[in-house]
Image: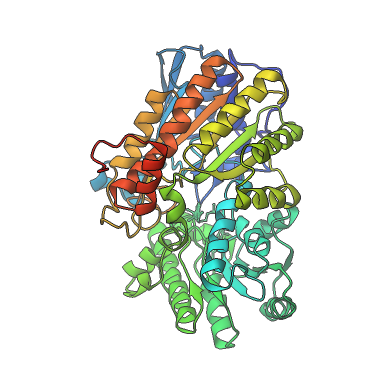
Amino acid sequence: MMREIKAKTGLEIECKGWEQEAALRMLYNNLDPEVAERPEDLVVYGGIGKAARNWESFEAIENTLRNLEKDETMLIQSGKPVAVFKTHEEAPRVLMSNSVLVPKWATWEHFNELDKKGLMMYGQMTAGSWIYIGSQGIVQGTYETFAELANQNYDGTLRGTITLTAGLGGMGGAQPLAVTMNEGVALCVEIDESRIDKRIDTRYLDVKTDSLDEALKLAEEARDEGRPLSIGLIGNAAEIHHEILKRDFKIDVVTDQTSAHDPLNGYIPEGYSLEKAKALRDADPVEYVKLSSASMAKHVEAMLLFKDKGAVVFDYGNNIRQVAFDRGVTNAFDFPGFVPAYIRPLFCEGKGPFRFVALSGDPNDITAADKKMRELFPDNEKLLRWLDMAEEKIAFQGLPSRIAWLGYGERVKMGLALNDMVKTGEISAPIVIGRDHLDSGSVASPNRETESMKDGSDAVGDWAILNALVNTAAGGSWISVHHGGGVGMGYSLHAGMVVVADGSDRAARRLERVLTTDPGMGVVRHVDAGYDIAIATAKEKGVNIPMLKE
Ligand code: NAD
């Protein structure tokens, strides 16, 4: 069985309350063809990140949500609904645990065995926790990363520079727009032409070509004129990057967003077409992984050579350095990950990818919310600049939504304002508020969000679990714990949070609690690791940390 799922809009609900309806609509939204990468296989993004284990589970989730009472909670185990318990009205309606394996068994080999037997599902980050909103969900994070890179290296703009990257999938597809928003030129290598077409259709990418010569010519011209341009080049990064090196063409910035975290499903070995790769994957997965990881090693070697030539090189959170290191590239970690290089100071203030979605499907609801955000934060110039650009350049995918990096204190302010707007009718239907798992206090991921922590606590997983526990206690609408997102099996633990603003007083209480505990965990986690910005934030905002000295 396979169904085409469309995001559901309008004011009529089929569940017994808006909170349950919100979960149903967000599940549908995750799988809308405008949003998901391979909805026919329930795959949302990030390699094989899925929204439900199989179609049978999907239907069972739908039916359970339709019948779920306001004081009941559904439990999801790796994409399959396994129980409904009576809890209470301020408890989450859904609790999820996705892809979690006991540490000693936490490998792709073991996961793939269980997946094959139908016992597990890979939830990635927001795929399995029903708060994926397409490339628009990541684009601000990508924009902020490149903006900070530009601040550190090029007087605050990428104008006149060329960024080379690969992977134009669900997340990686945000790269070209983030680079052009920073006024630079993006050269993006992608093996799958249909992904390039999707990014052009959704206005994330400007042009495509299958000729390296043409791509370099276009890039050079735009760079010399100081004109922003993004180019999708059909090809394999493991080959193309070395070709560019051979031509001694100047590249300024290099990163990568192929799905290197999943060597079996996420990376195409050099010399293979998509069809040949699929045939080999099915016939001989062991050989496939051998070939794909060898290509990744070559890919990383090229990145290191660009670095030797003076380019700014960083890892974009797909674990490609680890794969190359395991294949004998001993200096693979010579370039840093994007979090320690550019993002951590924001995490210290509890800042991260706050997002909200209009369940009505009416874009005017987001326009009204944007206006409110401008009123609430008139001095936050970075945010105002972001909103200007977002309104002009970002096309909605699926349900209209907005991403805005907000910190501790700001999120609760915005959340309560949205709830008020739903109450007064300024916004026509309830709003779903959530975030990526890639956030300040919700991830333990030593090759990504918690790389090079000041106190060496990179691999401490307690923080992600505490985040899910406290957000559950505070009354989020659906809360999840995942393993393996972003960087693959064995490398991360992380938690998701969604809370619904339906205009009620009960929602206001829950929003007030959850939108404080959630970014609060980010501040606390970074205080514990000894970051000065986090300590100052905690003191200024009065976060209660028992062992923080005055
Ligand atoms: P995706 O699976 O949707 O897309 C990956 C793309 O890489 C595909 O389009 C694929 O065709 C392409 N590709 C594979 N092998 C290639 C090769 N050899 N040469 C050129 N192209 C190749 O994944 P996604 O959602 O875009 O995520 C990409 C990676 O980024 C994942 O590892 C993900 O975990 C990571 N990620 C990063 C962030 C971030 O903010 N930095 C956030 C989420 C995910």
Residue 406 spot, x, y in % from top left: 53, 43
As rendered, which of 274 and 380 lies closer to the eye?
380
Instruction: Locate the N terminus by quadrant.
Output: top right
Question: Residue at the location (66% across, 28% down)?
Answer: 359
Question: Residue at the location (28% across, 46% down)?
Answer: 528
Above or below residue 349? Residue 372 is above
Question: Residue at the location (69% across, 49% down)?
Answer: 390
In the rendered image, is residue 477 in sight? no
As rendered, which of 388 and 145 lies closer to the eye?
388
Instruction: Locate the C terminus by quadrant.
Output: top left
Question: Residue at the location (57% across, 27% down)?
Answer: 416
Residue 326 spot, x, y in % from top left: 32, 67
Q: Is residue 511 left or right of residue 106?
A: right
Above or below residue 177? Residue 253 is below
Residue 347 spot, x, y in % from top left: 43, 49
Above or below residue 398? Residue 149 is below
